[in-house]
Image (cartoon, helix red, strand yellow):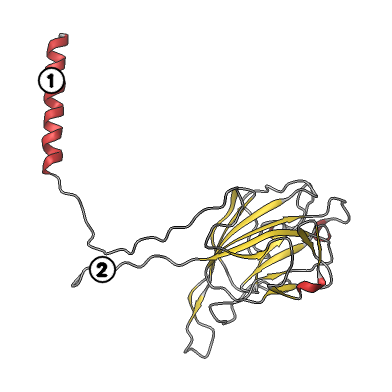
Amino acid sequence: MNVRTLLLVSAGALTALGAVGALQKEYKSGVVWPEPAVVTPGKNPGDAPSDATVLFDGKDLSKWQGGEKWEIRDGYAIVKGGEITTKDAFGDYQLHVEFATPEEVKGSGQGRGNSGVFLANRYEVQVLDSFDNKTYFDGQCASLYKQTPPMVNVCRKPGEWQTYDIVFTAPRFDEQAKEVKVLKPGYVTLIHNGVVVQNHFELQGNTYYDRPASYQKHPLKQPIRLQNHGNPVKFRNIWIREIKPLEGKKPEGK
């Protein structure tokens, strides 16, 4: 086949494709969607977006019950004197938390840099110094405590700042049932230091140390709790975004 013939064949093929394209019709679902709200992202990675509620900006813990017990220094808070719980309650959300385990290493296993982020005041995302520190896998850093280990260990060295970005979907319960009836379980996605370590994990229930996880019925919106486990873990830059999927109006009769 010479060059002229090849060009003619190619042109004919393109013409045929164009004709097929002209006959195709765009698929339209008919669903009427509301316009997504405009949210301005943070200027730098980890900064709160414009629709976030800042829970700790490095200055005070006034949005937390018990916050006066913790020590605030140089833009971070140090675990001290008890656990703290948000004064407000939240349902489904995106939560950003930054933490650092003590630079001076003391202890081992669960006694080293231990704290926790309790979603809905009962489902624990473990905070621990898991850099060169062996413990049971479903209790190491970024585990859903006693339910599942992280898929990978991406802990930074002791004293270095680390990030948790958590997407939490609260469980739904049958409010009319006398017994605990779960209509929809809770789910957690966790990004630790930029790496997905929990991918839409289905929660098995409340966090317990001495017995299997099990659900207890609770309201949709619950506070967030930061644990005091006796180690001076640092926290900073904590913010939250409540999330709600867009709801479109389906075509009538469909």
| Residue at horizontal 12 percent and vertical 40 percent from the top | 22
Q: Crowdedness of circle 1 by 10 Å Cα count: few (<14), some, many (20+)?
A: few
| Residue at horizontal 84 percent and vertical 66 percent from the top | 230
- 98 or 61: which is nearer to us? 61
Note whether 67 is above or below 94 in the view shown.
below
Question: In the picture, which quadrant includes the C terminus?
Answer: bottom left
Left or right? Give the position of 228 relative to 4.
right
Q: Amino acid at mark 2?
A: Lys
Q: Crowdedness of circle 2 by 10 Å Cα count: few (<14), some, many (20+)?
A: few
**Residue annotated with mark 1:** 9
Mark seen at residue 250: 2
- 90 or 179: which is nearer to us? 90
Residue 16 falls in image quadrant: top left
Q: Secondary structure at mark 1?
A: helix
| Residue at horizontal 75 percent and vertical 68 percent from the top | 227
Are the residues tagged 2 and 1 within 8 Å (C-beta)? Answer: no
